[in-house]
Amino acid sequence: MGLGGVGGYFGGMLARTYATNREVEVYFVARGKHGLEIARSGLEVETPKGSFRVRPEGVVEQPERLGVTADYILCCTKSYDLEAAVQKLRPIIGPETVIVPLLNGADIRDRIVEQLKDRGQVWYGLTYIVAMKTTPGTVRNVHGRGKLLFGSGAGRCERGDELEALLREAGIQAEWHDDIQLQVWKKFIIISVSASVTSYFDLPVLLALERHPDMCHRLLQEATSVAQARGFDLTEEYCWQELLRTWGSDEKSTTSMHRDFRAGRPTEVDSLCGYIVREAERLNIPVPTYEEIYRGLKVGICKCEAVLNGRLTSAASLPFGIWKRGGACYFCPTFFGRGPVPLPYSITTPDHFNYSRN
């Protein structure tokens, strides 16, 4: 369920491996032009080692049309689509169906359980992968196989062994973890901080970390304080090192939330940033940096490094991309994909907010 970069890559790997295995059937649930193109021509999966095209057993937008009860469901939707997606899946969920969510967020399993009540078995899951949908019918994995971690939260079991074997047979680096809730929180903190600073400063991950380390460390301190209050032994320094290790040395990589903001699409800001604010309030923990960023991103206020008339001006507050300097107004057309604001100024360098007045 969810055939964007993550679901498309893992689904493609599974469909390729089990294409001729009648004991394992792989189905895709995809919508819109993407789903139509996959149904018509198959799914093209691009990887650093080459591309391949797969045709699953079936491709539908409405799961009830499959006429099956699923053994395993990898749920790869965006967090803002989660509740609607789970309701669509209900017709194919039986008592023994295992749902493994691979969404970004610390409360994803709880939200699914709330929707399904006692229906199915909802486990924990997460993935480390940089993948995206590039065009309808095509997904791209940028950095290799990726890693998929999962677990039930209640100890190893036979179904866990079976799923791990199915995934590994397909070339997916899958790992069962008894401490999966700790792993979910670790990944959540890394992605929460990364998504927050990339979106707030409109920069790729490594540039955001390099230019704004103080804010990154404040976010890590606040996020780990919430995690510790929840019983997870995660420190600021450990998460900082994991943050650097996760993103490696690719200066162009950014987060999916940052890409969504720039494209004007719905974002996961409520799950990745707002959740910390809400949970901190419940636990009576101060998180002023998260509150500042969450408030800014919710109302469209961003901070960037703007090059105006050839001079670097740092950390300017920009409500909806509007910036004032010396009585003159400037705007940033790339903010959140809103497009140019019709002001009487010409754009001299569109890529990095360099403007001159007519």
Image (spheres, helix red, strand yellow):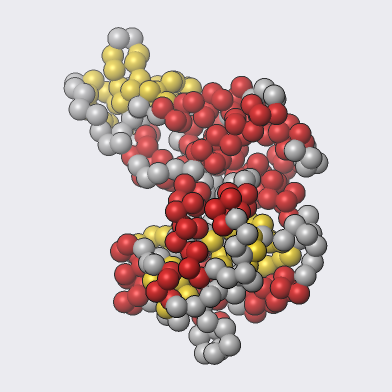
Residue 226 shown left or right of residue 350 in the figure: right
Relative to 27, say whether 283 is above or below: above
Residue at image location 52% in from the left, 29% down from the top? 294
Residue 14 shown left or right of residue 258 in the figure: right
Relative to 333, say whether 4 is above or below: below
Residue 200, x across and y down, in percent: 49, 32
Can residue 22 be seen here? The reply is yes
Task: Give the position of the C terminus as an image quadrant.
Answer: top left
Residue at image location 37% in from the left, 34% down from the top? 335
Residue 91 shown left or right of residue 326 in the figure: right
Residue 197, x across and y down, in percent: 54, 34
Residue 72, x across and y down, in percent: 59, 71
- Please tell me how many numbered marks the rendered image carries: 0
Residue lying at the far top of the rendered structure: 327
Can residue 47 be seen here? The reply is no
Residue at image location 30% in from the left, 64% down from the top? 33
Residue lying at the far front of the rendered structure: 118
Residue 179 sits in quarter: bottom right
Residue 318 shown left or right of residue 98 in the figure: left
Residue 3 sits in quarter: bottom left
Relative to 6, say whether 304 is above or below: above
Residue at image location 72% in from the left, 61% down from the top? 152
Residue 280, x across and y down, in percent: 66, 29
Closer-to-camera residue (135/313): 135
Closer-to-camera residue (68/260): 68
